[in-house]
Image: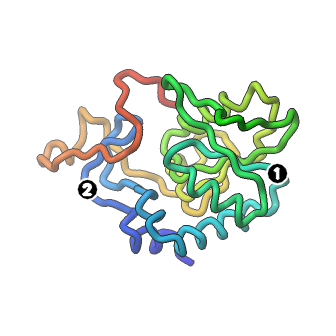
Amino acid sequence: MNVLEVLEQAQGLLHGHFCLTSGLHSDTYFQCAKLYQYPDLTEKIGSILAQKLAATEFDTVVSPAIGAVIMGYETAKQAGKRNLFVERKDGKMELRRGYTLERGERVVIVEDVITTARTIYETIEALEPFGVEVAAIGCIVDRTCGKTGLNIVSLLQIDPVTYDPADCPLCAQGVPLVKPGSRAETKGANVR
């Protein structure tokens, strides 16, 4: 299965002029939430990700809410593992809803798209008090191309075309800028 074709089929790969979470501009945006409209495609993608993670020893999948909850669930289901999620409370990721983890438990964090890894770092920080081991990071699309130093297992690795807003040719051409992501833009945020 060609993951890029599946994302295009589900209209989860957008072309235009986008403001990314990092504040950079790009001509490409992955909106994996569009994929989740189609349970059969989501199941297939979750199955492929679970297969890629099969060599990793882990107990539990943890995903950041809200965007990755469905992919985390589907990957955990396909791998036969427990599934949890972290969510924001007062702007900070937390493990809530009575979820708990055991010290030494091996966790795989599942995200849909990793662009800056900021949410991954916030998820890791939320898990630190439990003393777990993060065995791997799984995702559909890795836009970091290995620049994070994290152990990322991805189905698709894309070296994104990005532009500084001050030097963006799409802005110069007057192409309308769209911010389709789920995170509110934060001026001056420390993005990793």
Residue 81 horizontal side relative to residue 30, left or right: right
Looking at the picture, tell me which residue is in the foreground, 138 or 102.
Answer: 102
Q: Residue at x 68, y 46 (%)?
A: 84
Number of marks in picture: 2
Q: Residue furthest bottom?
A: 1
Q: Secondary structure at mark 2?
A: strand
Q: Do residues under tags 2 and 1 come within 8 Å of each other at their CB atoms?
A: no
| Amino acid found under the numbered disc labelled 1 | Phe
**Distance CA(mark 2)–CA(mark 1):** 39 Å
Q: Residue at x 47, y 73 (%)?
A: 6
Q: Which mark is residue 16?
A: 2
Mark 1, residue position: 58
| Amino acid found under the numbered disc labelled 2 | Gly
Residue 137 horizontal side relative to residue 20, left or right: right
Q: Secondary structure at mark 1?
A: loop
Give x and y (percent) for residue 49. Answer: 66, 63
Judge depth for marks 2 and 1 and give the one in front: 1
